[in-house]
Amino acid sequence: MSKAVRHLRALPIRSRLALLVAAAVAFAVAAVSVTCWFLVRERLYGQLDEQLRSEQVSTGLLQLMLDNCRQAEPRQLPLPPNSPIVTILYSDGSTCTNPGIESVPAQDADLAVADGEAETAMHSGRTTGGTAVRVYTRPVVDRDTREVQPGIAVSVAKPLGDVTKPLNSLAWVLLAVSGIGVVGAGAAGLAVARAGLRPVDRLTEAVEHVARTEDLTIRIPVQDDDEDEIARLSRSFNSMTSALASSRDLQQQLIADAGHELRTPLTSLRTNIELLSRSEETGRPIPEADRKALLASVKAQMTELAALIGDLQELSRPDTGQHGGRTQVIPFQEAVESALRRARLRGPELTITADVRPWYVRAEPSALERAVVNVLDNAVKFSPGGGRIDVRLADGVLTVRDHGPGIPADELPHVFDRFWRSPSARALPGSGLGLSIVARTVQQAGGEVALTPAEGGGTVVTIRLPGAPTPPPEDLPPA
């Protein structure tokens, strides 16, 4: 059995479906055929039994046979053709029939009728010549007194050929019809399986093509009104390839942009290090002021490289809401105050005003603080000397307003793109990833971020985060 199952599993799915359909049809046809055969058999036997019960042996013929059986040498009585076999039975087991024809041996059921133990008997048997017959036995009634004569009975037998021949013909017909039905069902099942699995074949070819060529632009055509499982699978495959293609494009774009951004500090570092190395090799010292400037430039480029690598690591994390740090309910105002302290250190000549009110959000602490630091760093970087930066946090809305040159309206749609930098800011330090990290962190926390021009010049950064002015009870510290 297990070997047959293994062979069945080794077949293609369309062949398995055709075999299953053929097997189901074969079972159904076999059940119907067998039931039909038995019903017809019972019907034919019932008709034959009714004929035997209604078969009347005339009193004269019966008396003539009784008289003939009493003679020492019975003579052959003239009977009509196709007459039933009539046999006289005695309780001692002896029988008497018309000479010249096959007799039917007596059975216990017949003797029971002759002995008066049973009223009638109906059974199948065989004649002395081997012919299958159906036998009906009843008592003999006296012609004059109309009483049952004890110890004697008469049986009427007819050949079963009238029943077996139609049954055999019916069996062959049912067998032929069943065979044709099973073959037709198998062919129909194979055709239906091929038609039904044609979309699966297209899907398989598409997957094999993607695996062979890594071409993610392939799509499986799906009708808009198709709602079956194959259509859903095709739509899912198309969505998956679209997402993979988009992810690969973003990855390639990130690699290209990162390579472009890394090239500038690396080129500057290489130039400065080559100057220092050549000075050491030739023995021609660089003036002290120039040497300090070179070392300061090397240090600045290394710092820029470290910041760029940190930003790339932040952007390389999966955008699924599951971060390295544990997401928890944190006080947004503390992240803002920590970022304000760092901003005041980086812009000591600036005036930074702050109006920070309590607000609790669910986010990753380090990522949220870094996002606020990036926003304040941009404000410090683009603010003129002696300028002012206004910071306000109220009802979950953080606004940072600077008084710098502002951002042109045509550049606002690109400020959150990775590695994008305004032409006017490309001479300033930075990688172009700060606002991308801000947008990603805010979106992961369920909030929104926007940049708009400020009245009177400058830029307003607005961050909205869902939360509450008080932490939930489960996050309160123990008393």
Image (cartoon, rainbow, N blue to C red):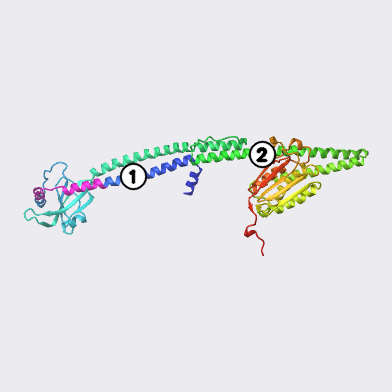
Q: In this view of the protein, which residue sits in the foreground, 42 or 407? A: 407
Q: Which kind of residue does numbered mark 1 sit on?
A: Val
Give the SS element for disc 2. helix
* Mark sitting on residue 32: 1
| Residue found 23% across the figure and 50% down from its top | 125
Q: Looking at the rendering, which quadrant does residue 37 occupy?
A: top left
Q: Which kind of residue does numbered mark 2 sit on?
A: Leu
- Give coordinates of residue 94: x percent, y percent: 16, 54
* Mark sitting on residue 102: none
The residue range painted magenta reads: 42-65
Q: Is residue 88 left or right of residue 144?
A: right
Q: Is residue 361 left or right of residue 426?
A: left
Q: Is residue 162 visible?
A: yes
- Give coordinates of residue 359: x percent, y percent: 67, 53
- Give coordinates of residue 296: x percent, y percent: 85, 43
**Residue sticking out furthest to the front:** 456
| Residue found 29% across the figure and 41% down from its top | 170
Q: Is residue 128 visible?
A: no
- Give coordinates of residue 32: x percent, y percent: 34, 44
Q: Is residue 215 left or right of residue 82?
A: right
Q: Looking at the rendering, which quadrant does residue 382 occupy?
A: top right
Prevalent SS, magenta region: helix
- Give the quadrant of the C terminus: bottom right
- Kindly identify which residue carries mark 2: 250
| Residue found 63% across the figure and 38% down from its top | 246
Please say whether residue 46 is one of the residues in the magenta stretch.
yes
| Residue found 59% across the figure and 38% down from its top | 241
Which of discs 2 and 1 lies nearer the camera? The answer is: 2
Q: In this view of the protein, which residue sits in the foreground, 41 or 127? A: 41
Give the SS element for disc 1. helix
